[in-house]
Image (tube, rainbow, N blue to C red):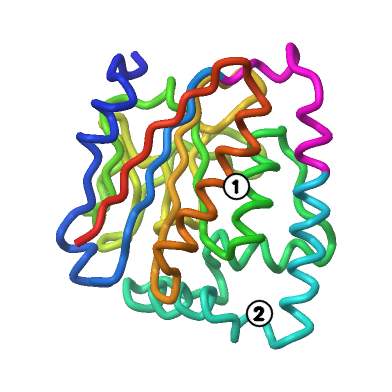
Amino acid sequence: MPSSMTPEQFLAAASVDPAVFELRPDYRAGLVVIEGLTPESERRGSSAVANELVAAAEHHAARLRAECTIEELAHIAAWRETYRAFGAKPQRTQSSLEALTRRAEQGLPRINSLTDIYNSISVLHQIPFGGEDFGQYQGPARLIRSVGRETFDTTVNGQFATAHPEVGEVVWCDDAGVTCRRWNWRQGRRTGLTGDTRAAFFILDLLAPVTHLEYDAAVDALTGALTLLGDDVQVSRRLIRA
């Protein structure tokens, strides 16, 4: 069953394993739960909000690419270094930030308003974001280094499948299994955002050179956009650091 924890209880119980901080002592996890969202079929104007942010993100990515190669962008370079540190090859498995910044050249993927909004803000602020359905979580979110036996609910060639992370891989998980592999590479199917999501959980993965002011600006942009998607939107947040 989905977790019955309140957002405050959920955030208080969330954790980052010390082994992750050993890998990157500068890492911080920005966690945000947003309640009171109206289902997409019942709201007006959400597409306009998403469209505006997507256009801004695509323009911003083009400007960044004109300044240097994507690999040289400071925030992306930090994640490429981090992926190598736990054995992942960034050429094959890019951070979500790098993948989206590259994808923006052909146009960001359009999934649903919630996903389109947070993907756009991720590119605009150059911070990896994860967005998930809070109601589908079973127990608190935890960032760990995998032992290789955890289960990951995904799709392979369009078919539902169960996979397992590699030993030592950095993964987000709850009591039911892995929710995101390789820190922020690929999210699982079970907790994905949908048009029916009423409470969303967002993870902002922060490495230097991201400052606290930049983190606050990204959260403000997210909450500002999502307050337009419900009549009584409520925000809870927590920052976890070493």
Question: Label 2 amino acid?
Answer: Ile
**Magenta highlight range:** 37-51
Q: Is residue 32 left or right of residue 17?
A: right
Residue pictured at 77% horizontal, 37% vertical: 49
**Does dot 2 land on a helix, a strand or a loop?**
helix
How many marks are shown on the rendered structure?
2
* Residue 23 vertical position relative to residue 171 in the rendered view, above or below: below
* Residue 178 placement: quadrant: top left
Most frequent secondary structure within the magenta stretch: helix
* Residue 230 vertical position relative to residue 185 in the rendered view, above or below: above
From this viewpoint, which residue is outermost toward the left?
18
Q: Is residue 155 left or right of residue 88?
A: right
Residue pictured at 42% horizontal, 52% vertical: 181
The first of marks 2 and 1 along the sequence is 2
Q: Does residue 38 show up magenta in the picture?
A: yes
Depth check, front residue: 20 or 13: 13
Q: What is the distance, in whole Å, between disc 2 and disc 1 at their CAs?
A: 23 Å
Question: Label 1 amino acid?
Answer: Ala
Q: Which quarter of the image is occupied by the N terminus?
A: top left
Res. 70 mark: 2
Say if mark 2 contacts mark 1, CB within 8 Å: no
* Residue 201 vertical position relative to residue 147 in the rendered view, above or below: above
